[in-house]
Amino acid sequence: MKSSASAARRIALTGILGAEAIALSALELMIPPLPFLPPGAKPGFANIVTMFAAAEYGLAGAVPVTVLKALFALVTRGLSAFLMSICGGLLSTAVMCLCFRLNRGALGLVGISVLSAAAHNLGQLGAACLLTGTAALYAYLPALMLFAAGMGLVTGLILSAIFPALERQKRFLKLP
């Protein structure tokens, strides 16, 4: 009986984290494109929630959040946005989980955030090249990596600041 209650609590937390990630994604859609940013670049605030899930629960906790974010992109922006989101999200999530598994202390939340932002941009760029059938898009790589470094720094600092608040959700549901 205890394990089914724990499973229900874990599913509830995944739903809460997914809803938070979707809310942050929706807020990002309201930010107008800025002329000095690479086309389609967004801050990646929803990855704050994914990183928390990766830190606390590993791949099994982070992948559902990533998939929920990608499904939100499908519903709100279509198939191309879904493919870009799922490719960038899964690569980013894999990098996060690998970093947390190997040694969180060596990189810290900010370092892991920067690496996962770079992986996200690489995954999306690869998807864009496949969707358009042209490798010329790789010309955006330097700008995307610079953007990933900046936004990875910002999202890592935000996660560092709000990590305790996110952990309280877990304690409220009485999860280990």
Image (tube, rainbow, N blue to C red):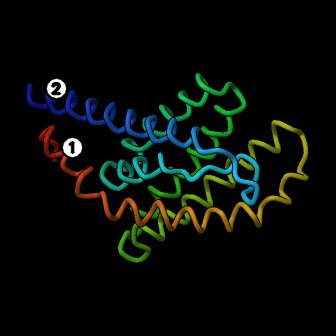
Quadrant occupied by the N terminus: top left
Residue 70 place in picture, x, y as percent: 56, 33
Report which residue position mark 2 lands on. 4
Q: How far is mark 2 from mark 1, CA to CA? A: 19 Å
- Total label count? 2
Disc 1 residue type?
Gln
Q: Quadrant of residue 143?
A: bottom right
Report which residue position mark 1 lands on. 169
Tell me the element at label 2.
Answer: helix
Q: Residue at x 70, y 53 (%)?
A: 34
Q: Residue at x 69, y 26 (%)?
A: 79
Q: Is residue 115 above or below residue 125?
A: below
Residue 148 place in picture, x, y as percent: 62, 62
Residue reaching furthest to the bottom = 106
Q: Quadrant of residue 114?
A: bottom right
The residue nearer to you, when weighing 27 against 163, is: 27
The residue nearer to you, when weighing 115 against 73, is: 73
Q: Residue at x 23, y 57 (%)?
A: 164
Q: Are marks 2 and 1 in contact (CB under 8 Å)?
A: no
Instruction: Indicate which label's residue lies in the foreground, 2 or 1.
Output: 1
Tell me the element at label 1.
Answer: helix
